[in-house]
Structure formats: C-alpha cells, structure tokens
Image: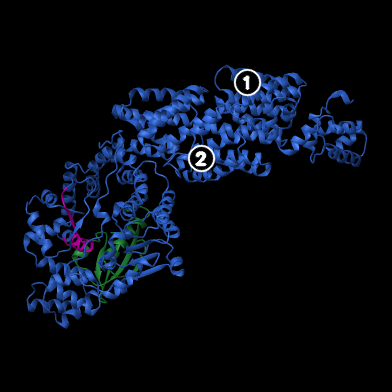
Chain colours: A green, B blue
Amino acid sequence: MAPATARAYELRVERHLGSGAAALFPEFELRHESDGSTVLTGTLADQAVLHGVLARVRDLGLVLVGVRELPRDHGAG
Amino acid sequence: MPDGPAGVPTPEPIPLAKLRPPTLHPRHVARAALTTRLADAWRSPVTLVSAPAGFGKTSALVAALGADAARVAWVALDERDDDPQRFFRLVGAALQSVTGHGAVLERALSTPQAPPVPVLLTALLNALSAARSEALLCLDDLHLVADRQVHEGLEFLVEHAPEGLRLVIATRADPPLPLHRWRARGQLLEVRADELRLSADDTAEMLTRELGRPVGEATVAAVLHATEGWAAGVRLASLALVGAVDTDERALVERLAHGAGYALEYLAEEVLARLDGPLAAFVLDAAALDAFTPDLVDAVTTRGDADARLREARERGLFVQAAPPPEGAPPGAAWWRFHRLFRTLLRGRANAIDAEREPLLRRRAAAWFEDHGAAEAALEYALSSGDTRRGARLLDARAYDLVMQGRARYVERTLERLPAADRDRAQRARLAYGWALLLRGRYDDLAQLTSVLQDEAQELSAGDRAQLLALRAVLADTRGRAHDALALAYEVLDAAPEGDLVTRATAQMALAGARRELGEIGAAIAAYEGAIPLSRAAGLAVPEGLARAHLGLLYLQRGQLSKAISVTQPLEGAAGHPATAAALLSRCSALLERDELAAVRAALPEATALAERGGQPAVLVNAQLTWSRLHEADGDRHRADAALEAARTLVERGVPTWVRALVAARSCEASAAAGAFDAAEAHLVGGEALGARGPVSAALALARVRLLLRRRSPGDLDAALAITSELVANAGASDPGDGVRIGALVVQASTQAASGDASSAHTSLARAVRMAEPEGFVRTFVEAGLECAAILGRLGHPYARRLLAAFPSEVRARVLGATPEPALQAATRRERDILRALATAATYGRIADDLGVSVNTVRFHVKNLYAKLGVGTRLEAVERARTLGWLGDDGT
C-alpha cells in the first residue's frame, strides 16, 4: 500500500525513450507523444523519491520539459 | 579487526586514484578556445563547470590545467564522499600532495572526535597563506555531495582563501553555494553546457579521429543534430559508425537526422548490437558493478573470460576508465569502470532484458568482497541488492572501527537503511553508534539506546558487555548517580580487555567523576591523572580535555593554583579543538583567583568561542560563570548578572548535577548581593535539593553563609557561625583541601566580625592570609567585600596589604579612612533611628508614621545620610551603617 505521503506525478521529457531508458524508471509508465516527447506517470512514495527521479533524468542528460502532480485518484491501479 | 599499535583502528588509506586527474583520451580533440577560457581558472577565485553528464567537463579541465599538474589538487568525488568528515579529509590529502599543507586536516578528520571543519580550515588557510602556496583545488563531480556542512565548509574556504588558492568545481547541477554573490563580485568564472558543446568542426574532427577515415558532411550534420554537440553522444556515434559499411552508415545517418528517439540510448544500442555475444555479455554484466577487476567479473558471472573481454573492450574504446579501488579491496589489482553515462545506458539495457540479473550479480559481488576482506564494499553491495541480512551482519562487524575513524555519520545512515528487524539484530552496530552518541554528548539519546541494549545484554560478547557497562557508567556519572557510576566503572575495568583502550579510558573518566562527586578529591585527582594517558592512547580528544579541566578545578579547590594552571596549559597540536575549551576555562578560574585579570581577559573569548563550537552545555555554562566573575571583578555588575542569567538558561539544555549546583550557588550570591534575599534563598534551596556532594556542596555552604551574613534575620548570624566552624573543621580534616578551607576561613572571619567577635575574626583571617600567600589566592578575599577588607586593614601581614591593594579603590578608601570615622560623629540620633528603620523592609510612609514625622522629613534625613555615608542606595546605606556598627543598640 502506498504511504500517506505518496503522490502521483507526471514527468515530460524531450525525445522518445526506448525500453533501455524505460528500465531506468521502473516506477513509471511511459507514453510516447506525437510531439516527440515522452510522458512518464507514476506514484512516488515521497518527495525524496521524486528528487531521486529528477537526478536520474539529469544524469541521463534528458531535457525535462514538465513536472506536475496528478489528481489523487489517478493511476491508483 | 585492523588494529593499530594501541588498539585503535587505523584509518583506511585514501586511494591515490581519487587524487589524480584522469589522463586524456589518446584521440582527444583539442579545443583551443575552451582551453584558453578554462586556463583563467588561475585568475578566478572560483570556477564553475556546470553541465550534464558526458559533456566533457573533466576532459576540458584536464586539457586546460594538466600542464600545471604540480599545482593542481584534484579530488574525484563519489557517492560515499557525501559526508563532511570524509570530504574534507580528501581535500586535506589533495592539498597536502600539492602544497605540503593539509596533512593536519587529513589526520584530524580520521579520528572519532574531530574538531569542526571551520576550525581545521582556518588552520589550513593560515598555513597556505603563510607559505604563499599556489594551488588549484579541483572538485570533480561535486553534484554527488548534498551535505550542508560540506557546502558551508566550501563557502568558508572561498570567503577566506588566500590569494594563491583557487577553487574549481565540475558538476552536473549547480551547487548550493552563494554563486550570485560571487558572480556579482566578479569572483566566478562560469563554463556551462553551451560552451562545452562540440561545434561542427569539433564533431567532424572527433569522428575523423575515432574512425580513422574522412567522414561525409551529411554524417557530421546528422550526428550534430541528434547529439547537439554532446561529447558523449558524438563518441557513441563514432563507436556505432566504426566498421559500419556504407549502407549501415546511411541508415544510421537517416535515423539520427530524422528520428524522434533519445539519441544516446539509440546509439548505445547500435554499439551493443555490433559487439559479438561474449563481449556484449561482459559489458552488460560488468555494468552492474560500480568498479571491477576481471577476477570480480568472473566471480559474479562464473564465465572465466573477463580478462580477455576487458582487453577487448578497452581496445575498442568502450568507455572503460581506471577506477579507484573500492574501500578495503585487496591491494595490487587494477580496477576499472565504465564512464558513468555509458554505464547508466548499459544498465538500462540490461534491466530491460532481465530485471533480476543486476541484483543477483550485486549479491554475488557482496559475497566476493566479504571473502576478500573488503567489508565496507561488501556492505554497500549487500544493502543495494536487498541482502539486508548480510548487510546487518557486515555493519555489525565494522561499525565500531568506523565510529572510531570518524565515520559515525556513515554508521548512522547505514543503520537507517536497514529494515527494523535487521537493525534489531545489529546489536554491535547499535552499540558502536552508542559511542558516537557519547562522543557527541547526546546523553538522552544514549540513555534510550543503552536501556534497550541492556535488555539484550545476555546476547552480547563479554567485550561488548564491558563497552555497554562503560557507556552506562558515564551516563550514571553525568546524572549525578556517583555510587552507580563507581560500581559500573569498576566492573568495566575488571571485565574490559586490556587492549580496549577506549572502553577503559571511558570507565576511568566515569570513575574519576564519581570520586569527585563523592568529595574524594585525592582519589578523583589520581583517577583523572590516569585518564589522560589512556585517552591519549585511545585517540580520544574530548575525555583528555575534560580530564585536564577537572584536574584544574580540583587543584584549585585543593589550593594548588600553580598546578591548576600548569595542568590546563594549552596543548600543542590541540589548539583550536573544542575539547580544549573546558580546560582553558578551568585555567581562567585559576588565573582569576590569582587576580591575573589581564590574562583571563585575553584567554576567555577564545575559550568561549571554542565552547560554542563544541556545543556542550556544561562547558558553555562554565564559560558564562567565568564571564560573570570577570565582569564582577571589573566592577560591571550589570554584565555579570547578564552572564549569570545566560548560564541559568543554558543549564536547561541538560548538564551534570554538579554544574547545576554550582550555578545555583553563584545565583544565590548574586541575588543576596543585590538584596533580593527571597530569590537568593530560592536559588540556594534549589541547589541544595540536588543532593550534590563534594566540593560543590562546600560552594553551596559558602553561598549560604554569605546570604545569612547579608540578610541578618534573627538567628542568621548564629547559623552562619555554626556552618563556618563546621566547614573550617571539615576542610581541615582531609579533602577538600586548602582552597575550600581558605574560603571557609574568610567567611568565618566576616561572620565573627559581624557578631562583634573582633579578635576571633582577626585570628581566622590571619590564618586564611597565611594559607593564601604561597599559591597567591586573591579573589576569595576580594569577593568577600568590605568587611573582609576592614579586617585585612588591621592585619600587619605583608600579604594582607597586597590583598588589600586588589580591592576596588572605593573599598580601599573606606577601609583606610575607617579610623577615626568622621561620619559617625556627624550622625544625629534621628538619623540613626531612620537608618535602623531603613534596615527593615518598611516603606518611607511607614517609617514616617512610626517616628511621628512627615514623609518629606524622612526623605530629607535619608538624603543627608546618603551624603554622610558616601552611598547612593538604601541597600548600600544599610550595609555601610552595619559595618560602622550604627545599627547596634548603643544609639537608643
């Protein structure tokens, strides 16, 4: 069960990520957008996890174009 | 257990690879403009090279600064350096190798009780400044360090660096340093991603060199488009293009020019696809390891071809780099790793193929490291692969050594990483953490921990049980439970192994504290004297400093001022360590007693600053008490009270019982001197209720006598006489010694004088003066005030005259003018009536009523009285009249 501090997030990065890069973000579902970006959605336990994810984005040299919190009922499954 | 000569673990040596700039790639593309710009690092206080992974930050720095390697102090950081002690130890080692200064920093930070970083940095910067050393301190991969103290230390370093020291930072994320301020002051040279991007020419040259053949414009354009001049991308592209036949190259160019994919990932896959099976397997498996040797790879893959594959990978330029050996790894072997970015891409690929493989390989690596005696590396691998059981076991075995090497922080963090069940099982690690709590003075946390461990004590080994007992002994001592502390300490000294110096030194300190608390001064002194060499051998700075501090106070109480001053002498090599604060304060107390106020004024600010850095409440309280006495000696009542008030506030942070009692005694005296007798009584009763024994109980008794002497309610003088004669008799018997006896005789003399027994007063004070002379006691007399001065004035002893000279000039003037007393003749009968009324708490209105005069008449007489007595307040008037004997019954 997700802890009380858990929140669902959506990250958007430039370029389409393949399966190798996807494996580096196991906590997210990936979706390729027609504008050439990739949207990652997932529920993260707390802010520390989010910062860890952002560091991973940075370490891959990905260009981050958006981060937003999703409504609570999103992605409960 | 890696034991040094004295049973203290020796610190792990720093791998040289962490302090050496990497060598440039043989096919490195020189970039003149970038090199010129970065060479300006020599003229800029701070240089920041901030860009994502793989932009060639490190190579650019090496190309620009490498020619001057003898002046470049290089530090290659990794995740484990996110710890101030470890970080600055590396900085010290790097600067040592370049400037010959820095070894002090490195050594100090390898001990369990290192001074705070700014203290060490100050010493280092002074040394660098004095030697006019020139050095560039290069911190590579600073983004791996998040610790606040590290960044505070770096800020301090930049703000105070001498001309010759420059800082260079290479990082993927801007550090939390005051970059704005430095930018505004023109102190910051910044090179960011845009400047690091390869131009079309750079890209063409790089591809040509890597491929060993000319490359078409379309290919260069496509690579540049897909990678945007990202150096790692261009190199990957060159690897993908090596050996590609024309059609492959066209397909690749097409995809790079028009594809929407993440270029690096795509290129890495292209590279992998071109490797033959065994090499691809090697590369994917080795990427699961932070660093590797062929032996380690063979052990985790059970394939046995790693040596050949590694050679192949290096020949093909598959981003293989030399790596620093993991902590405690067997010496001799060369360690390797993949470039961080390439490794991340490889791990993604490997995880996409089989997500279970990496944890499996890392668990095997943990076993391999454990078999090869590299416990810390084994611990990291075990924890990161979810093998927390092995992790707990490894931490258990290593934690004590880590704490004693100044790695308490790492132990704390690692304990937090363990699931509760494994943490419970790691008893020895928790015990080791108990030492860290003790060394930092976190007694409440320690009390909680020891009570939990106590319940599980039967599961501990005999040596560990002795450690637990030692921790409990110290706790009992700080809580004023002297008999418990004594019993526990003796049990430790019986049970602890001879070689366990830390445990023995700790027990010895608890023993000494208990003896002191029980008033057994001689035994306490012997125990503290014994604790000094033990603590030193155990490498513990704090107990040694505390032992010296206590010895100073004990010698002071015994009347041996010169010994008190010599035992608290600042130690060479320990200068600036907060552990020396307590001893410096004891020294100030002894100097103060000798009335060497200039020396106290010189030493006290430094001692206070060190006490503040150390943050131990008991030491901070002592500092404020000493300030209070100094201000009082300077005649600044207001500031003396403020310091005392500060001491009372600090007491609430938690201090040993005896410190609390000492503050109560001083507070009582200050309140009594201000005429606030109820407050004085309250302070005193609070202090007495603590049940302190030993020298502190003597201090409380003296405070009570001084209160009685000032208050003089009916029966007070008789009570004072009884207390003083008991004090003098007891002090004379054995412990406590002369210091207390001198104090007791001085108050006895005052009490006898106040009771009209001038000849006894004379005898008592004469004794005190004779005892005070050899060691130079002064303040005990001066603080006893006017009454004492009056008797001193009548003693013929030469030392009495010297003592009198130390009194404030107005007191001296009154004593010297005491006979004949012109004011006495001038006082009228009505004025004497009013004086007697003033000595009670009555208001002017009440006095007027009692004497049948108007309030204005009372005011008139009071004004005249003040003038005749040369005083400014009602309290002073009463005091003065009392000294003159005007309040007796003779007047009526």
Taking the spot 47% from the left edge, 32% from the top edge, the residue there is B478
State whether discs 2 and 1 lie on one chain. yes
Place of residue B494 in the rendered image (x, y in percent of width and height, measured from the top left): 35, 22
Q: Nearer the viewer, residue B785 or A3?
A: B785
* Residue B425 belongs to magenta span: no
Would residue B172 be found to the left or right of residue B224 on screen?
right
Q: Dot 2 corresponds to which residue?
A: B617
B461 or A53: which is nearer to us?
A: B461
Give the residue pinned by disc 1. Answer: B727
The numbered mark 2 sits on a residue in which chain? Answer: B
Mark earlier in primary sequence (2, 1): 2
Percent position (x, y) of residue B645?
A: 62, 41
Quadrant where the image shows the C terminus of chain B? top right
Q: Inspect this view and state whether residue B701 appears.
A: no
Q: Is residue B346 above or below residue B844?
A: below
Amino acid type of disc 1? Answer: Leu
From where the camera sits, is residue B138 visible?
A: yes
Residue B346, magenta (yes or no) = yes
Q: Name the quadrant containing residue B38.
A: bottom left
Q: Label 1: chain? A: B
Q: Which residues are magenta?
A: B332-349
Taking B538 as reference, is B204 above or below it?
A: below
Nearest the camera: B310 or B556?
A: B556
Q: B617 left or right of A24?
A: right
The disc labelled 2 sits on which kind of residue? Pro
- Report how far apart the C-alphas of labels 2 and 1 lie in the structure: 30 Å
Residue B508: assigned label: none
Q: Residues within 10 Å of mark 2 (few under 14, many from 20)?
A: many
Residue B206 location, quadrant: bottom left
Q: What is the x, y in percent for residue B323?
A: 21, 55
Q: Nearer the viewer, mark 2 or mark 1?
A: 1
How far from the left and from the top, in percent, is residue B84?
37, 51
